[in-house]
Amino acid sequence: MSAVDWATLALPGLVWGTSFYFIAEGLQAFPAALITPMRVGFGALTLGLFPAARRVRIDRVDMPRIVLLGVIWMAIPLSIFPFAEERVSSSVTGMLNGATPLFIAVVAAFMARRLPPKQQMVGVAVGFSGVVLIAVASGSGGDNSWFGIGLIFVALVFYGVSLNLAVPLQQKYGGLPVLWRAQMIAFVLVTPFAIPSLSEVRFAWGPFLAVVALGVFGTALAFVVMASNAGRLGSTRASVSVYIVPVVSLLLGALVRHESVAVLAIVGCAIAILGAYLTNRSRR
């Protein structure tokens, strides 16, 4: 792999790792209910600029599943995170998101109605022990609350279900056409709920640009680069980028936003990433 390959491999994880920082910054001026429609709106506008997202025609029989993904992949979890970050620091939110591959594996086992292979069960067990450490170390400390952590777990469950349901559609049409349509559906669904909160806006350019970056980069371009990486480097190698997300979120939260992070939570984050890696490796 060339230096450019390594850079593009790391880019999605670096961008997604900043998402929770951008949410926290956006909350300084915009109510939580408004973050999601702004995010998916800018994301959908950006994805719409790519012909690969627009030129594929979706069969009518598959549209109900696209609508379902718009609800459970975009509208609900992306709406949960801003409300969670009113109660939980961005660094803790990012660290807990490192468990996303674990939730995907568990949901996949339920959908298949059979236990996963032994090696995968070991990875899930290791990963969730790390998640427990993050939660226990963070739940009663500083600005973090158990309710906020619970909201994050709910969002991760929705991620686990939706990402399993998205696989056959992405294999049939490609990732970008599915993602673009799901984001447009989510925008239509969440915008009416944000209108009553417009009076709470305290506009400032910094938070506004943070939400723009969240939509353009985190909700659109990172997916474009990830799809390109999967095509050029293979999906196995491309997925390595996901493990960067909690590390970037932790560093931004601690060093830029000066959030206090328990040492035990950092240990839990490392264990959760290890578990996610073991789980994904055994699935392959």
Image: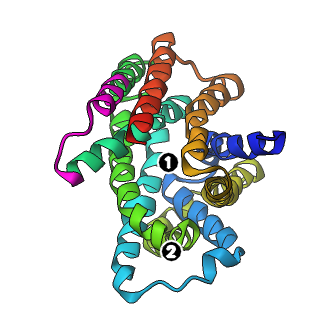
Q: Residue at x 50, y 62 (%)?
A: 197
Q: Position of residue 232 (x, y in %)?
A: 68, 55
The type of colouring in the image is rainbow
| Span highlighted in magenta in the image | 111-126
Q: Residue at x 19, y 40 (%)?
A: 115
Is 7 left, or right, of 115 in this rendering? right
Classified by dominant secondary structure, the portion drawn in magenta counts as: helix
Height in image: 269 above or below 5? above
Q: Amino acid at mark 1?
A: Pro
Distance, label 2 to label 1, CA atoms, is: 30 Å
| The disc label shown at residue 39, or none | none
| The disc label shown at residue 173, or none | 2
Look at the image and tell me whether residue 149 can be seen: yes
Q: Position of residue 260 (x, y in %)?
A: 57, 18
Name the image quarter holding the C terminus: top left
Q: Is 116 colored magenta in this rendering?
A: yes
Which residue is at the far right? Answer: 3
Q: Position of residue 40 (x, y in %)?
A: 57, 64
Badge 2, how many Cα within 10 Å: few under 14, some, many 20+?
Answer: some
Foreground mark, 2 or 1? 2
Residue that badge 1 annotates: 82
Callout 2 secondary element: helix
Name the image quarter holding the N terminus: top right
Question: Which is nearer the N-term, disc 2 or disc 1?
Answer: 1
Height in image: 101 above or below 275? below
Callout 1 secondary element: helix
Look at the image and tell me whether residue 76 can be seen: no
